[in-house]
Image (cartoon, rainbow, N blue to C red):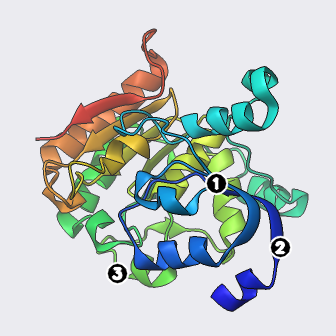
């Protein structure tokens, strides 16, 4: 990859993310041939032609860096850009999902993330599932995730999508009524469509990199529960049940002071 980068000239390279220090990240930045490299991460400032110290303390959501990029590129006019999420969908994919759902109202549960720290236990999944069925009878519950993970869920007769491509999960999210997820990808897709969301996050392993804050849902219709430990397994079933009810209550009577999403410390 580094050799491929060196062979390609770039006018502008953006490095908008904040990461834990990584030799691979440094190597990639060192390999880029570009007139201008704009970055925000003080760990890599030596590789940037322009370092912007936006939110060095990591106290704001990562999407605020888009405003700084627009300002760097377009000056004062950059403040007029719409920085909301946009997720395009193929028409045929969306049409199949609409046909699959019919008139049903859907609640998505995504309980097993790609990272080990973002995977609920069987007891936690059961607590969420039972609370959803009790609180919202008549709603259709669909589980999403990797097929192998879904097969491991110890619940009888759960429903999953019959489509393999991730685009169908995106379309399902757009046409769902609620989303409950440990996977930040699905959380931010739900944010793009302003779907009421319960996001379950592990606490930060490093206090200097509070990932649950900078990668929070960015959705005024979202509730974020942060685990007391470094894995979502540390969230008690009681907290999960209360959070599910809070999600449904919030969606009926949204808080007038809600901005980017209510944040709650579990435990």
Residue that sits furthest to the right in the current view? 91
**In terms of image quadrants, where is residue 170?**
bottom right
Q: How many marks do you count on the picture?
A: 3
Circle number at residue 208: none
Q: Which residue has dot 3 on it?
A: 152
**Residue 40 image offset from top left, x and y in percent:** 52, 48
Note whether 206 is above or below 144 in the view shown. Answer: above
Q: N-terminal of the two: label 3 or label 1?
A: 1
CA–CA distance in space, label 2 to label 3:
47 Å
Q: Are marks 2 and 1 in contact (CB under 8 Å)?
A: no
Q: Residue at image x 28%, y 60%?
A: 125
Q: Which residue has dot 2 on it?
A: 9
Residue that sits furthest to the top in the current view? 256
Q: Is residue 107 visible?
A: no
Q: Which residue has dot 1 on it?
A: 49
**Residue 160 image offset from top left, x and y in percent:** 54, 69
133 lies left or right of 72: left
CA–CA distance in space, label 3 to label 1:
49 Å
Q: Residue at image x 38%, y 34%?
A: 223
Q: N-terminal of the two: label 2 or label 3?
A: 2
Q: N-terminal of the two: label 2 or label 1?
A: 2
Q: Which mark lies nearer to you, 3 or 1?
A: 1
Disc 2 residue crowd, few under 14, some 14–19, many 20+, Cα 10 Å: few
């Amino acid at each position: 990859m580094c050799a491929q980068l060196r062979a390609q000239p770039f006018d502008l390279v953006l490095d908008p993310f904040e990461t834990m220090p990584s030799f691979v990240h440094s190597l990639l930045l060192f390999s880029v041939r570009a007139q201008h490299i704009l970055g925000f991460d003080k760990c890599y400032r030596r590789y940037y032609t322009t370092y912007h110290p936006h939110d060095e303390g990591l106290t704001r959501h990562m999407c605020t860096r888009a405003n700084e990029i627009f300002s760097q590129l377009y000056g004062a006019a950059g403040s007029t850009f719409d920085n909301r999420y946009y997720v395009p969908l193929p028409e045929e994919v969306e049409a199949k999902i609409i046909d699959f759902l019919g008139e049903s109202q859907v609640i998505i549960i995504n309980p097993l993330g790609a990272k080990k720290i973002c995977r609920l236990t069987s007891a936690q999944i059961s607590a969420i599932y039972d609370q959803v069925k009790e609180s919202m009878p008549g709603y259709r519950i669909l589980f999403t995730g990797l097929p192998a993970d879904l097969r491991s869920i110890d619940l009888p007769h759960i429903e999953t999508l019959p489509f393999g491509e991730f685009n169908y999960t995106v379309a399902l999210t757009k046409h769902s009524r609620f989303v409950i997820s440990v996977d930040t990808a699905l959380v931010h897709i739900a944010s793009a469509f302003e779907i009421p969301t319960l996001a379950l996050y592990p606490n930060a392993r490093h206090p200097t990199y509070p990932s649950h804050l900078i990668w929070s849902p960015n959705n005024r219709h979202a509730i974020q529960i942060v685990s007391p430990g470094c894995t979502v397994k540390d969230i008690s079933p009681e907290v999960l049940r209360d959070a599910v009810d809070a999600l449904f209550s919030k969606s009926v009577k949204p808080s007038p002071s809600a901005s980017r999403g209510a944040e709650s410390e579990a435990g």
